[in-house]
Image (cartoon, coloured by chain):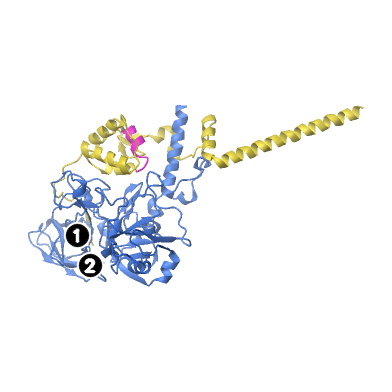
Chain colours: A yellow, B blue
Amino acid sequence: MENQKKSKLHFKAKRNLFYGIGFVFVLMVGVFIYFLIDPALFVSNADDTEEPIYVDKPDSKEEEYNKVTNGIHVRTGLMAADGFMTVVNNCTNCHSAKLIVQNRMNEERWKATIKWMQETQNLWELGDNEHIIVDYLVTNYPPQQKGRRQNLENLEWYALE
Amino acid sequence: MKLMKRRHFVKKSTLVYFSALLGTDIIFGNLLPANYTPLALQDPDPFKLFHKDSQMEILNDKPWNIESKPYLLNDAVTPNKFMFIRNNGIIPSTIDVENWSVHFNGESILNEKTFTLNELKSNFKQYTYQLVLECGGNGRNEFNPPAKGNQWSTGAVSCATWTGIRLKDVLDAVGVKDDAVYIGYHAADTHLSGDPSKEPISRGIPMQKAYQEETLLAFKMNGEDIPLAHGFPLRLVAGGWPASVSGKWINRISIRDKVHDGAKMGGNSYRVPCKPVEPGEKVRDEDMCIIESMPVKSLITYPKTGAIVNLGETLNINGHAWAGELEVKTVEYSIDFGATWLKTQLKKPVNRLAWQQFSAAVKFPEKGYYEVWAKATDLQGRSQPMIVPGWNPKGYLNNACHRIAVKIS
C-alpha cells in the first residue's frame, strides 16, 4: 500500500516535471518565433523593463558623452552656445556636424538649406526648433567677408634642401 | 527613466556610427554584446580604413569626404593614398562581385539587357586611360559670400589610370534609339537618411560624352581593383567633367529621351547660373545650367608652400595642368603677382583628358617674401583668372590661379 502510494506520488511528480519542462519549452519556442518575427520590438521591450546591455565605449559615460572643452562640444565639434543641443539632436542624424562647422551662411541661406533638406533629404519638420537652430547657426557660423582673394595663411615655413 | 533613455540614445548613436562606417544597418545591433566592436570596424581610423595618407584632410565623416593637398599630388599618376574621396551617400558595405550585374534600360534603349560584371569584362575590349577627375566644388572655400557644401580647397582633383570597357561599345550592343539625349547612372550607395526609396546621387552625361572613346565603365584603377571608396567593382569614368558624373558602384544605366532627372541633376546641384550673377544673388531654377566640361586649371605640386630658399639658388617648381575637354597650351608662372609672366616647360598629355606636367627653374632677384603663381591657358586661349571667378550658389568651378609662398633668405 505504502509503496503503491509512493510510486503514485512519484509518477505525479514526474508528470508535473514533464509538464513543466514542456511548458518551458513551448514558451521558449514561442519567444524564439516572436523574436524572429519582430526582433526590434522584442529588444525595445526588454530595454524598457530591464537594465539592457550597452556597448561600452569610453565616450559612452554620461558625463563624457556630452563633454564641452574650451566652448566646443567635443563629440561633434560644434560651438557649445545657446541651442547647440537642439542642433546636435536635429542636424547630426543624417550628416556629420563637420558639414555644419565648415559652412558660413546668413539667415536666409541657412533657412533655404533647411528647406532643401526637408524637400529632398528627408529632414523632418522642425517646428519651434527651427528658429532655435537658425539663431544658433547665424550667431555662431555667420558669413565672413573674404574678398576676391585672400592672403596665404597658416604657412609653415621650412628650409628647402 | 530619463537616464535610461539617454543611455539608450548613446547606444543608438554608437550603432549609427558603426552603421555609417560599415555603410549598412547593423541588424540586431541592439543585441551587440558589451565591449564588442564589429570586426570590420576594429580600426575606425579613416586613413587606414580607406588606405589614405595621414596628411589628407577629412572634411566630413558622414558622408566621407576627404581632401588631398597640392604637395601630395606630385605624381603624374595619382596613387590611391593621395586621391580625394567625395561621397554623397553611404558607401555600400557588401559587394557581391561574382553576381554583380548592370542593367541597361531607359526610354531610348532598343534592347533592354542585363550584363553580369564578368560578361562586361569578357565580351568587350578593354582600354586604359589616365583621366582627370575633379570635383565640381574644388576650390569652393574661396567664394564670397561663402557657398554651401563641403569646403574643398585645392585637393579635390586626381588623375589616375582607369581600365575598363568603352561605354559606347555597350551602347552599340544594346542599341540606342535616335531620340536618345542622355544616359543616367544608378548605383548601390544608399541615402544618408537611410530611406531605401531615395538615391543619394544619380547623375549622367549627354550622348555625345557617352560615346567618347575615353568614357569607360571601369573596373581597375592604377592596375588594381578599384578601391571600395572609389567605386568598386564598377565605376563610370567620364574624364574632364565634374567627377560627380563618374558614378561609383554602378548597377544600372538608363538611356534617356530627355536630360536625366536623377538625384542631384536639378536645383543648385552641379549647376551654375546660365548668365553671370551678382555675388549672393538668388537664382531661379530655370536660370541654372548643368556643368559640363571643367575649366582650365593648374596646381603647383612641388615645392610645398612655405619653402625658405637661399638667395642666388634656383628653385625648381613643377605641377600639373588640365582643361576639361581641352588640352592645355601653355603654363606660365609669375613671382611678382602677375606683373610679369614667364613660360614653363609643358608636356603633352599621355592621352586626351589626362593632366599635363609643367616645370620651371625660378630665380629670385632679392631677399624677401614671394608668391609663385601658376597660370594655365587652354587651346582656345582661355586662361585661369588670378582672382576667384564668377560667384554661383554652390561655389563650383573655381579655377583661380594656384600659388605657393616662398621666402628668400
Kindly indicate whether the residues beneath marks 1 and 2 are on one polypeptide chain: yes
Q: Residue B155 sits in which quadrant?
A: bottom left
Q: Which residue is drawn at 14% across and 46% down?
A: B279
Nearer to me, B110 or B132: B110
Q: Distance between the residues labelled 1 and 2?
A: 17 Å
Q: Mark 2 — residue? A: B357
> In the displayed structure, would residue B395 be above or below residue B251?
above
Circle 2 sits in a helix, a strand or a loop, which is it? Answer: strand
Q: Tell me the amino acid under the disc marked 1.
A: Pro
x and y percentages locating residue A104 in the rendered image: 23, 41
Residue B295: numbered disc: 1
* The furthest residue to the left: B339
Mark 1: secondary structure? loop
Q: Position of residue B284 (x, y in %)?
A: 19, 45
Taken as a whole, is the magenta stretch helix, strand or loop? Answer: helix
Give the magenta range: A84-95
Question: Residue B385 location, x and y as percent?
Answer: 13, 57
> Viewer-nearest of labels 1 and 2?
1
Task: From this view, report whether residue B390 is shown above or below residue A136.
Answer: below
Q: In which quarter of the image is residue B104?
A: bottom left
In terms of depth relative to the viewer, which is nearer, A110 or B80?
A110
